Image: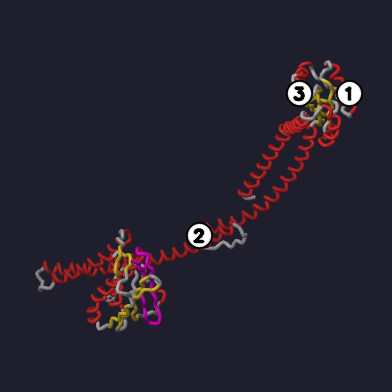
Amino acid sequence: MSKLGYKLITRITLALLAVFILTFAMNTYFLPKYFLYQKKEKLASLTAELSSVPADALDSIIPKLEQARDVTIVYTSLAQNTDDLNDRILRQLNLKGITLSKFWLSEENIALLRAGSRVNKLYDQAKLKSSFLVNFLPSGGNVLAVGESISYSKETIGIVNRFNLYIWASMLLLLIVLSALYTARIVKPLAKLNDTAKSIADLSFTHADIRTGDEIESLAGSINRMSDKLKASQQSLEARNANLRTFIADISHELKTPLSLIQAYAAGIQDGLDDGTYAEVIGRQTKHMAGMIDQLLELSRLQTEIYELMPTDFHRMLTTTIDDYRAAFRHKNMELIVDDKLPEEAWVMADSRKLESVLRNLLSNALKYAEGKWVRVAAEVQSSAVHFSILNEADTSQEAKWGQVWEPFFVMEESRSKQLSGTGLGLSITASILQKHHANYGHAAQDGTVEFYFSLGVMEL
């Protein structure tokens, strides 16, 4: 038996035993007292009712009360002496079938009754295994005795306790069997979940197939979803690590080339070989290195920097940015198509400097990598949001690679032979900024074109 099953059965057994012991103690020690208390309450209620009955009506009402309440009622005059009074009551009880071996009202009891007080007495009849509970009350010069026989509860309770013992023993056996069956139903799925958790810990992202229709099945579903997410996260991390390794190798190569040129031209200057262009080459290579380092620093800064979001006229920002790039597109003999459907003012909550950086990154990216002779920019307001998109021709045959374009350090062209292949940080910087703005963004690469887009909620002014 498993540890969980053993614990469950043990605790159920202990709980059942505790309830049995408590029941046994209540029956033995408290039930007789409670039973006597109830009888006393019954007689007290009846004597209170009799106290208001006139003396001349007692003979007619007593038989009715005896039958209705299952008690014995007798009365006699209080003017008699002690012996005659006791003898008179005892003979009346005998006539009604109540034979008492022990019965006596003392002088003190009779004095209390004559003073108008009530007296309660319990006469133990050991041979009959019963007691006789009597309430005495004075009424119109008479003393009324209202009594009821009470069987000994000790023997009855003993029988009840033994019978309960048989019942509880049977229940305990049945519960142990049912607990064993039920714990097996619980433990087996939990054992499967444990094996699944161990597999996940070993990076083997398996599923637990459990159909119990309860919380355990729900837990299995949660673990399965966790397994899927961890698998996806691991694959994403492995892809990022691969991109990082590629980036480190590539950036090392990129930095090594200008450093080698700087070193060579610096040595040429020292040897007096400078023809007047060496310093210019050194400056150009230094600027190239500084640009790469700036991009790395910008990406790092954007992850933690606090954004200052304020109302920004997106339409004005877009128009100004596009105007800055028209000359660059004409210089490359490319047509910049602008489909501007925005209203005169389109206000969004944004960090204007960083949002402008997004537009410039996307336009620069299209300017560098577009394979055709045109780039199309579109902007409009739909569903209370500004939608921006930029579309150009591109090689979309490598679908798997297009899915990684937002990842840091990723470049579509693996060979670094192209002059404009870049460091793979531009779109990562763009994604970081858009995420901080809670913008919906993405891309679509199909049928020889690639489209980058994002949307921001429009402010209601």
Say whether residue 39 is visible.
Answer: no
- Left or right side of 101 for 340: left
Magenta span of residues: 436-461
Relative image position of residue 95 (x, y in whole percent): 90, 27
Please provide percent x and percent y for residue 333: 25, 84
Asked if the residues shown at circle 2 and circle 3 are in contact, with their CB atoms under 8 angstroms apart, the answer is no
Residue where numbered disc 2 is placed: 200
From the viewer's perspective, is residue 421 above or below residue 139? Answer: below
Apparent side of residue 307 relative to residue 25 in the rendered image (left or right): left
Q: Secondary structure at mark 3?
A: strand
Front one among 145 and 382 = 145
Using the image, tell me which numbered label, if any, was put on residue 91: 1
Above/below status of 321 relative to 234: below
Query: What numbered label is drawn on residue 120?
Result: none
The amino acid type of the residue labelled 2 equals Ile
| Earlier sequence position, callout 2 versus callout 3 | 3
Q: Main secondary structure of the magenta part?
A: strand
| Label 2, label 3: how far apart the Cα atoms are | 81 Å
Label located before the other in sequence (2 or 1): 1
Task: Tell me if residue 279 can be seen.
Answer: yes
The residue type indicated by label 1 comes to Arg
Could you tell me the amino acid type at mark 3? Answer: Val
Which is more N-terminal, label 3 or label 1?
1
- Image quarter of residue 252: bottom left
Asked whether, in this view, residue 119 is left or right of residue 342, the answer is right
Depth order, front residue of 416/72: 72
Eye-nearest disc, 2 or 1: 1
Magenta stretch encompasses residue 438: yes
* Mark 3 Cα shell of 10 Å, populated few (<14), some (14-19), many (≥20): some
Q: CA distance from mark 2 to mark 1?
A: 92 Å
Q: CA distance from mark 1 to mark 3?
A: 20 Å
224 within the magenta span: no
